[in-house]
Image: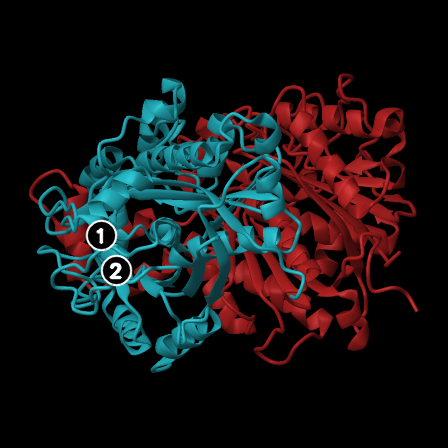
Chain colours: A cyan, B red
Amino acid sequence: MSNRRDVWITGIGLVSSLGEGPEAHWQALSSGARPVIDESGFAPYVVHPLAPISFDAQIPKKGDQRQMEPWQRIGTYAAGLALDSAGIKGNKDILSTTDMVVAAGGGERDQAVDGAILTDIEKQPNPEVFLNEQLQSNLRPTLFLAQLSNLLAGNISIVHGVTGSSRTFMGEESSGTDAVRIGWSRIAAGTSEIALVGGAYNAERRDMLLLFALKRLAMHAPWAPVLAEPKGVPTGSAGAFLVLESPEHATARGAKPIAKLSGVWSERARRNEPGAVEAVLGELLKTAGATDAEATALFSAASGAPEPTQAEAAVLARSGLPVRSVTDRVGHGLEAQMPVALALAALCVAEGKLFPPLDGETLEKPFDGPLSRAIVTAVGHWRGEGVALVERAD
Amino acid sequence: MASYTDKAGRPIVVVTGMGLVTSLGQGKQDNWAKLTSGTSGIHRITRFPIDAMRTTIAGTVDYLPKSKSTAPDLSEELATLAAEEAIAESGIGGKGTFPGPLFCAVPPIELEWPQRRILAQEAAPNAPVSYDDLLRAAEAHGHDAWHERFLYGSIADHLADRFGTKGQPISLSTACASGNTSIQLGVEAIRRGDCDAALSIATDGSVTAEALIRFSLLSALSTNNDVPEAASRPFAKNRDGFIIAEGAGALVLESLEHALARGAKILGVVEGVGEMADSFHRTRSSPDAKPVIGCMRNALADAGVDPDAIDYINAHGTSTPENDRMEFTGMSAVFGERLAGIPISSNKSMIGHTLTAAGAIEAVVSLMTIANGRIPPTINYEIPDPAIPLDVVPNVARDAKVTRVMSNSFGFGGQNVCLILTGEPA
């Protein structure tokens, strides 16, 4: 691994409940604003709703917007922001060689159609035939495309013209970590010059809450900070994309780094073994250089699911480093959570300082010193541990 | 002593184990016998009622214990069987331990109708059923196992446990190009020096009533229902859509050095992989075929060979009017006048379109084609399409020396991935 190149972050696109773009996020975080939560719209659950967004700004064709479910619109919008931020929006030469790795789940179901079918199906002499008939006549033909995991990437290709390559990873939180890891690995190894990596999540949907509810893992109101009181996942609508680039490629086009992505690591603890998550995360943090680190903060992308979050909090506490919970600020965006946390980490490293602690999140301590490194920890609500290291580029 | 690196100085990536499951049968030998005898695995659907369906045929795998279970259950079983065959052939690792990562292409996964119906019945509202009712029932009635089962990551996670692969497995989808992407990620990881071996699996056991209806609503499926085995007609004039099908393919990838050091038998080489996304449309390919042409050329360039070096093409060949025409246009541009002399066949004429799994299944069949010197035919080629004149190895298998194969996969969302496969290290 000796011939690894540096990897720069040259573009950030971020939308969440706090707004859009790095400035809005920095302003909200540095002013110590309370998180934006909705405790009634999806009662009894807590969700962080997406801030009002004018999608036209990045997805000008209404026809394109109509072809997408909200999660795809959020992602396509955030991807456009990232390309703008990197200064390559509309640059066909570069976009045609830009490698894309997207972390995605699936799209929203037509809940009205599902509800109508479920209301009547058990009264039918032949329920399965009834189901066929109802689906055949009531499903929108294009809905399928708005549900397919790889169609977020497909929409980014169509709307923004990113066509170098296109890969979609699935698998909840770990897919976000691995999407960034593979994009990073290819640039570090010299087989890619520029990549668009990230993901998007729409929390404002009951069918996604249903998946968590099956194991009683969705956070019930009232909201609570996840590291201090991990009582469930407070899902949050968000999209985040990063433009990763080799220093050679960036320099040649006169682009400056926002920060350096110095490494991404993923692992899989065997969660039925006691202490496995703590051990795996501890090792990953050691690899990322969290030991005896100066001017370094930990950004936690913890899910809020009780057991893994308790384990993560224990490791964070032992590190002795300043900690900030990304999930407390913007909620948990599942596949998108690592990209979201990386975007915020890169933002703070670029600013050179950390935002203030949140009341009630007892692990968070004031930190006024200069910040030159940020380590993101991402422990999946069910599986997968990941860590990423962001450093100042100068 | 052969070099361990290719023309570009990268580790040569070889295949040392392969596994297959399709509607034709379980295991490579059974599949090969049927593929070379021109047997179709397409049949009338019995898994669910076909009343009200415009398409009533498929290449479902109906002979396994999980064939009547959920899509992730069946997909996992298919993947397990394919991987067991591949790992046993390779002889790599030890019981429950595989010395490298897992790249696993999986179909779309979500809670299914039987589970939704149970939740609705448990909720038993005195009003129309809503998702709020399902949410209440989900929290109250202890269906914990469904949570894990319907996560996207659970198939690969269970496979990682079973086979002992290293690190966090990657679950992926590039739609109908997914199988090739699962191989591509393994090849790249070995070339980077991240690992010496990788397990690439692509699986799809997702033929449910709703999946069939969704593709049907997009007008993608054949409605040649009368004679199921004659419905998949790649490159024929009377083709009218693809036949949805199930299966899995698995490949053990290794660096040549690692394979030789442990005395493994080399089954083939993944010489090159090419990729290029299409920004034209969500389901249709760019009419000028430029992305497909670029993808094929990228694969050739990655392998470091000229188009002249390809002597057989394992086509994507879905049997949809548009794909087969576009694939012809792309191949014409890349291979020029030589195209007429290159045998091209579509395994999908017999297996149907296994969607997520297709690329891996066809990579396995491509390497068996090289090893056996025998090209599986494109069956149901009764009416040639004069607009796309090709040697599709019509209807009957052909003996031929094949040294280098291009295997194409294209998918919704502008996904294109091509592989260049050879039998022996150059």
Q: Which residue is mark 1?
A: A329
Q: Is residue A234 visible?
A: no
Residue at 57%, 63% (x, y): give it. Answer: B102
Q: Please, what secondary structure does the residue beneath circle 2 have?
A: strand
Q: Amino acid at mark 1?
A: Arg
Circles 1 and 2: CB atoms closer than 8 Å: yes
Chain ID for label 2?
A
Other residues around mark 2 within 10 Å, as few (<14) / some (14–19) / many (≥20): many
Q: Which residue is mark 2?
A: A325
Q: Is residue A225 visible?
A: yes
Q: Quadrant of the N terminus of chain B?
A: bottom right
Q: Please, what secondary structure does the residue beneath circle 1 have?
A: helix
| Whether residue B164 is situated above or below residue A247 in the rendered picture | below
Using the rendered view, name the quadrant where residue B195 is placed. Answer: bottom right
Residue at 32%, 59% (x, y): give it. Answer: A301
Q: Position of residue B415 (x, y in %)?
A: 58, 37
Using the rendered view, name the quadrant where residue A280 is placed. Answer: bottom left
Q: Position of residue A178 (x, y in %)?
A: 49, 56
**Could you tell me how far apart the alpha carbons at marks 1 and 2 are, in whole angstroms?**
7 Å
